[in-house]
């Protein structure tokens, strides 16, 4: 008789953003006249840049003719895209990353969920707290943890690295040495960033201890400060200890287009085994390539026109981030993030819990944010506001919140 | 110190189609003047139908404007597509399948690789032999088998169900009762089909023994015979024992567009646990939805125009299948398949091995097919030719083969 993967039953509820969507839907149904402003989920609102639209149309047209039709894509992605990525995102920043170390995919969420599959089940995992839930949940589902402790909001056997106001939302090395360590900078949800010197310490720590760093750089396009690295490969020695995840969702508005990539350096090995080869095997067996038209759209992002247009879009959202940050600060809230990231991390007033603040904001201001506790125990008492709304809605939301 | 998933090391080589691609590339490099005809990989060659192109252009245009821009898609797919699927592919055929039992994805290869994740690691797996390698490899990678035995070409602990000329390439119930059973009809690679009465026996067998059937119906559009079922849900009781995988790759030419779906009926349970809920959790955590523009293209397939246009395309490929089947038969080859499937399964002449025949065909006729042994031990001595080439190339290939 067949049996299910019981690790799934350890997960306390449904996926955070599904819960939020249900709460909003219920409130909207009861209050159809209310205009809800969503600064919750990290979804973009600006249309795709003209050069991307043009690339999509032209690729669609190619699919209409036998001579230019494209069937199955190469497993790892088309060379034209991998070359553009390697050059623009890495080599131009002085990082030694080649096209054959790039694996194109349908997004960083999938990659950050799938990457653990090439690792043994007995690896000890460390995550930041608060944290993007996918890192935790996918390791739970694979069976790398014990059960969930509702009191601590922790899974047994997982190492949590608190990110608090005291440490500027950048964790210290954990007491227990992990085997695998997830880092995300600029950070989701706190919006915190690390300097290159800080990240170098993590790379050295990882190399010293045989730790694999899974580095999520989905928000690198939002970096404004010189000393903040765009890639972990800007650090010496990262090639032997780090995998990097990248996304087109936030820099180019691809949340509904789906494109991302993973960098697995050839020097990254476990004994004699190349992780690049393992990920290639996983990619080739369980994935079938990103759509041709989407890869063409991705390549358009790296043209001169594309770079200028997406830069403008990032600036648009960063203006929102500053409006949120400054507006709330002026109103007396304690805020962080928003400088190198499209997220503002807000201390809830007094002893209000994150979910109470969520309900209050939804019902009083008709504004949706994300409860910090949804990202982990140390997110309790915090709240994430995203800069991905329209400018008008963002101003209106801040106005409503400050008048609450 | 981090360690890798050692199950990957059990896999004997790289993915079958990657191996073939390398062999072709090497030959082509040495013989740049040769015009190779590829009837190997099941990749389509006809351009997308006009109504699909139109839908893509129009969806791209929506992405260009704030008011019609689409960000993150719903986890399970857009309602417009899931409703169209439920109605056209199931309800119109008398199958009780609702839209909320449909999970839209980026293709059946991914789904057939990922679906095992919701199952316990100690499930005993049965597959046909020969078989689509993804079913086997993903279970090996997850750790559900022992090592590979090069002598038998089998993985320890996996149940193989021989599909031979004697049984018309439709397996008998295995001696040892499995927990999970993969079936694919119309079959890849043999092109064999089952009648509804035959499939009903499998459904009854599964329900009797608590077996989960993972039913791959990626080729259902190629069915020409009345008694062959298009969906396993045409059989009584399939709702309590079967998951079905479907693809847009072969019926609508989406190999480079990427769209598929999985049906997980709500009645399908392990004890009290709904597999629909488990797959929803997996989908919500490790996947982020198919691109909006691609889902709009998928919906176009279900319009009246769309249905007519893809039917024409299927007929085009089936004309190829008949040309291959009849041409080879006339030349004295033993052939099967090609009636309800776009694959012809060919007995290699004399005692030629599948890979020897591959080399012979590549070098003498400059035609690429797929060695039967790449699909399993019982594929040895067979060879798969795909009907997805152009008609002209297909005729030319058959001409070259028969003159060999």
Image: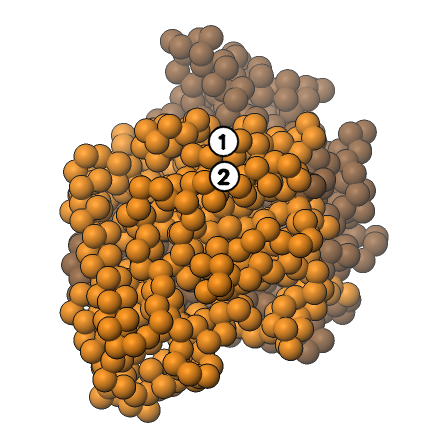
Chain colours: A orange, B brown
Residue A351 as seen in the image, left or right of residue B150: left
> What SS does tag 1 mark?
loop
Question: Which picture quadrant has residue B392?
Answer: top left
Q: Mark 2 lies on which chain?
A: A
Label 2 with label 1: CB-CB less than 8 Å: yes
- Direction bottom: furthest residue: A30
Quadrant of the drawing holding the N terminus of chain B: top right
What residue is rendered at 47% in x and 44% in y? A198
Is A277 or A342 nearer to us in this picture? Answer: A342
Q: Which of marks 2 and 1 is nearer the N terminus?
A: 2
Is B198 or A135 nearer to us in this picture? Answer: A135
Question: Which picture quadrant has residue A392?
Answer: bottom left
Is B93 located above or below residue A275 in the figure?
A: below
Image x and y of residue A312, in percent: 18, 49
Q: Mark 1 lies on which chain?
A: A
Q: Name the residue under label 1.
A: A236
Quick check: can you spot residue B23? Answer: yes
Residue A193 as seen in the image, left or right of residue A285: left
How many discs appear?
2
Badge 2: residue crowd in 10 Å (few <14, some 14–19, many ≥20) = many
Residue B217 as seen in the image, left or right of residue A350: right
Image x and y of residue B85, in percent: 40, 65
The circle on residue A200 is 2
What residue is rendered at 19% in x and 71% in y? A395
- Direction front: furthest residue: A166
Is B127 or A127 nearer to us in this picture? Answer: A127
Image x and y of residue B105, in percent: 45, 56
How far is mark 2 from mark 1, CA to CA? Answer: 7 Å
Is A119 located above or below residue A187 in the figure?
A: above
């Amino acid at each position: 008789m067949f049996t299910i993967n019981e690790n799934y039953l350890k997960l306390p509820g449904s996926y955070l953003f599904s819960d939020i969507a249900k709460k909003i839907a219920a409130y909207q149904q009861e209050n159809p006249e209310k205009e809800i402003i969503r600064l919750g989920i990290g979804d973009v609102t600006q249309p795709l840049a003209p050069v991307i639209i043009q690339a999509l149309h032209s690729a669609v047209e190619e699919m209409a003719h036998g001579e230019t039709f494209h069937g199955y894509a190469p497993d790892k992605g088309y060379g034209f895209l991998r070359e553009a990525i390697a050059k623009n995102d890495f080599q131009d920043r002085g990082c030694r990353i080649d096209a054959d170390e790039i694996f194109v995919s349908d997004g960083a969420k999938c990659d950050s969920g799938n990457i653990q599959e090439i690792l043994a089940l007995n690896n000890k995992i460390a995550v930041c707290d608060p944290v993007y839930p996918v890192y935790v949940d996918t390791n739970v589902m694979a069976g790398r943890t014990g059960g969930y402790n509702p009191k601590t909001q922790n899974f047994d056997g997982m190492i949590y690295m608190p990110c608090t106001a005291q440490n500027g939302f950048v964790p210290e090395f954990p007491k227990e040495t992990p085997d695998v360590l997830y880092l995300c900078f600029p950070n989701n949800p706190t919006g915190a960033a690390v300097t290159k010197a800080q990240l170098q310490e993590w790379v050295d720590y990882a190399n010293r201890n045989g730790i694999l760093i899974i580095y999520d750089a989905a928000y690198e396009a939002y970096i404004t400060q010189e000393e903040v690295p765009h890639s972990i490969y800007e650090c010496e020695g990262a090639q032997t200890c780090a995998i990097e995840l990248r996304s087109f969702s936030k820099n180019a508005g691809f949340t509904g287009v789906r494109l991302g990539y993973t960098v697995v350096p050839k020097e990254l090995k476990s004994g004699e085994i190349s992780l690049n080869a393992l990920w290639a095997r996983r990619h080739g067996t369980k994935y079938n390539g990103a759509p041709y038209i989407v890869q063409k759209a991705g390549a358009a992002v790296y043209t001169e026109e594309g770079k200028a247009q997406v830069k403008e879009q990032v600036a648009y959202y960063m203006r929102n981030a500053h409006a949120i940050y400054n507006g709330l600060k002026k109103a007396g809230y304690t805020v962080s993030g928003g400088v190198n990231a499209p997220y503002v991390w807000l201390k809830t007033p007094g002893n209000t819990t994150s979910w109470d603040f969520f309900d209050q904001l939804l019902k009083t201001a008709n504004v949706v944010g994300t409860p910090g506790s949804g990202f982990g125990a140390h997110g309790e008492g915090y709240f994430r506001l995203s800069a991905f709304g329209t400018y008008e809605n963002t101003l209106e939301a801040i106005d409503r919140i400050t008048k609450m």
